[in-house]
Image: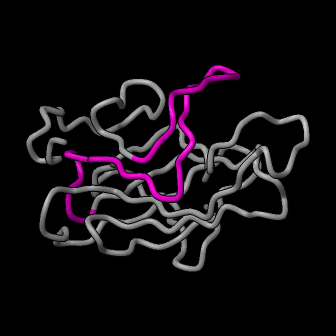
Amino acid sequence: MVPPEELRVPALGEADIGGSDDFQVSGFFDKEGGEGRTFRWTGACASVYLPAARPGAALSIVASSERRPAATPASVSVSLSGQSLGRFMAGPTWSEHVFVLPSPLPPGPPVLRLDVPTWRPINVDPAATDARDLGNMVDRIRVIPADAAKIAVSTQGGGGP
């Protein structure tokens, strides 16, 4: 294992989860794709190293729970380096959820963590063969500079913009 701060990852403003994210992610399943996008399922907790994180910037997470059973909603807790940023509900379609990064940033490397209750497809679909404990699907994570255009921000209680 290599600590995040020793990874040679450029401080790009966007991580294409399921695309070019190999060295930045932990706690995600293998890459998948469909409908013109790539993504990864999270497990119960997933982390992304974000060297582009800056104090006061906004953080955009594009996520979906389209394949989750309706009885197990995907309430996602979001934190950066141990400091809570809030929660969002991943809905049945791809949607963007935005959070403001704290100023100053928490000490240590900027690691985004997503905590989500899991479900197992084999337990809800008799035809399923997938025994993974899945959280929700993540497509893209983007750091938006603080001086960028004003955008709607997800609330602490959940929900998207």
Residue 142, quarter of the rendered image: top left
- Confirm whether the magenta stretch covers residue 32: yes
Q: Which residue is drawn at 15% across and 42% down?
A: 2
Please give left or right for residue 125 compared with residue 139 in the image.
right
Q: Residue furthest left?
A: 6
**Residue 27 higher or lower than 45, as above or below:** above
**Residue 116 higher or lower than 43, as above or below:** below
Residue 11, quarter of the rendered image: top left
Q: How is the image coloured?
A: one colour
Residue 20 position, x and y percent, is 37, 25
Magenta segment: 27-56
Q: Is the magenta stretch mostly helix, strand or loop?
A: strand
Residue 133 position, x and y percent, is 62, 50
Please give left or right for residue 21 compared with residue 31 in the image.
left
Q: Nearer the viewer, residue 124 or 87?
A: 124
Please give left or right for residue 59 compared with residue 136 in the image.
left
Q: Residue furthest bottom?
A: 157
Q: Residue at x 45, y 51 (%)?
A: 60
Q: Which residue is drawn at 89% across and 35% down?
A: 127
Q: Quadrant of the N terminus?
A: top left
Residue 105 position, x and y percent, is 19, 68
Residue 22 position, x and y percent, is 34, 29
**Residue 78 higher or lower than 155, as above or below:** above
Q: In which quarter of the image is the C terminus?
A: bottom right
Q: Residue at x 13, y 69 (%)?
A: 107
Q: How many labels does the image show?
A: 0
- Confirm whether the magenta stretch covers residue 7: no
Q: Which of 101 and 40 is in front in this view?
A: 40
Q: Which of 45 and 54 is in front in this view?
A: 45
Q: Which residue lies furthest to the right in this view?
A: 126
